Amino acid sequence: MKLNDNYKNLNESYLFSTIAKKVNDFIKTNPDKEVIKLGIGDVTLPLCSEVIKEMHKAVDEMANKETFKGYGPEQGYDFLKQSIKEYYEKKNVSLELNEIFVSDGAKSDLGNFLDLFDKENVVLIPDPVYPVYVDTNIMDGRKIIYANANEENKFLPMPDSSIHADLIYLCSPNNPTGAVYDREQLEKWVQYANDNDAIILFDAAYECFISDSSLPRSIYEIEGAKKCAIEFCSFSKTAGFTGVRCGYTIVPFDLKDDNKINKMWLRRQTTKFNGVSYIVQKAASAVFTSEGQKQIKENLNYYKENAKTICETLDKLGIKYTGGKHSPYIWLKCPNAMNSWEFFDLMLYKLALVGTPGEGFGENGKNWFRLTSFNTIEKTREAMERVYDYFK
Ligand code: MLT
């Protein structure tokens, strides 16, 4: 018996588990302190009523002999795929139903998709970025090269034609920096991927936070992207499904010759995955009705209001940041040249506030810190009062 030695190359625990442990230890030893969490990007508003109504109906169907469902199609029910297809039509992107794969979330698909790629592929990952891209490739032992995201390029690194990569991760709006690629920038990435016969793994989990219609919300808004990109999306941040679990991945037929990757992904999913529950898929389909869209927008606006509160506080204090406008994340430069773990400790031990140290997202995040807008309005205001009083 031989274990996968690549695991030795990982940090001892996943970023958010390390933070949760530190925070729980603090809470145990400081039971009188009210800790406010602006750390992991987990939502606080409940599911909207349209979703709940559909979910209840689906539960009742499962209680009835005539409407009960057993195994569903591994790729997802047509009713949900049809709603996703129509959602993309509004972005002027036309998809076939079988290019859409419903899953239990973007994180699992981002990791699972690597089953399809040889270990010899060179992977290009922006630094800083969502740690799952790096960790899942380390687990497989792939060579990773980094694209520097920094203050100079506004955390939006661009391709370098002198460097070859086979797999490229892009996340826009970006986790953790909140930076968003514009059309021209994405065109350059698509061009680079097609020139290099590479594949872009495009994480669009935060697309619904984009409020400027000139910014692309899907990579398929860019010509040529169906030849080189897979898009991962999720209901977690859009509709509060972090605990319910549902997402979808688009694998275009045009991606490489002979519909090869779509077929491989179908083969992989039919073998290793039994699909998302009918109840959850019914709930997810309610997100796309006109009432569902209206209700989730109200929730998104609530979080945007929190982002505004955070940005205004940082503006008053003269602290530099990115994000917040088209993203639930605010990425700030740690005051007084502190490193991000020092700043994490200061926030936790002095102010009872939790954020995420930038270093957890990569080397380039070592003097940066991420706050989320997903807490309640009251707690976000209280948190920002604590920050303002301490740093003013
Ligand atoms: C985050 O805080 O970066 C996200 O919640 C992580 C995730 O979506 O898995």
Image (spheres, helix red, strand yellow):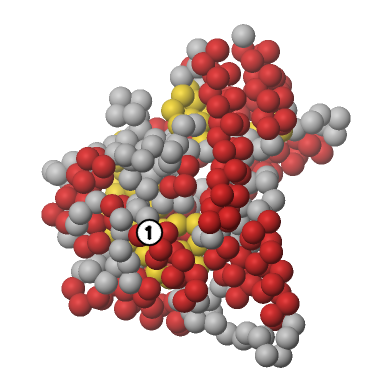
Closest to the observer, 182 or 110: 182
Closest to the observer, 346 or 99: 99
Question: How many numbered circles are shown?
Answer: 1
Would you say 330 lies left or right of 257 here?
A: right
Would you identify the image quadrant in which residue 258 lies?
Answer: bottom left
Q: Is 295 located above or below residue 272 in the figure?
A: above
- Residue displayed at 54% across by 60% down: 289
**Is residue 39 visible from the viewing direction of this image?**
no
- Residue displayed at 68% across by 13% down: 389
- Residue displayed at 61% across by 37% down: 302
**Image quarter in which the C terminus is found:** top right
Residue with the most extreme front position: 290
Q: Mark 1 vs ligand 1: CB under 8 Å?
A: no
Would you identify the image quadrant in which residue 71 lies?
Answer: bottom right
- Residue displayed at 55% across by 27% down: 308
Estimate the x, y position of residue 78 in percent, counting from the top left: 47, 76
- As helix, strand or loop, the secondary structure at mark 1 comes to helix
Closest to the observer, 310 or 107: 310
Q: Which amino acid lies under the numbered mark 1 shown in the image of this protein? A: Tyr
Estimate the x, y position of residue 305 in percent, counting from the top left: 59, 31
Q: Is 70 located above or below residue 330 in the figure?
A: below
Estimate the x, y position of residue 314 in percent, counting from the top left: 54, 19
Q: Is 24 located above or below residue 311 in the figure?
A: below
Would you say 226 lies left or right of 363 here?
A: left
Circle 1: is it few (<14), some (14-19), or many (20+) Cα within 10 Å?
A: some
Residue with the most extreme right position: 32
Would you identify the image quadrant in which residue 54 lies?
Answer: bottom right
Closest to the observer, 64 or 98: 64
> Which residue was labeled with disc 1?
88
Estimate the x, y position of residue 69 in percent, counting from the top left: 63, 85
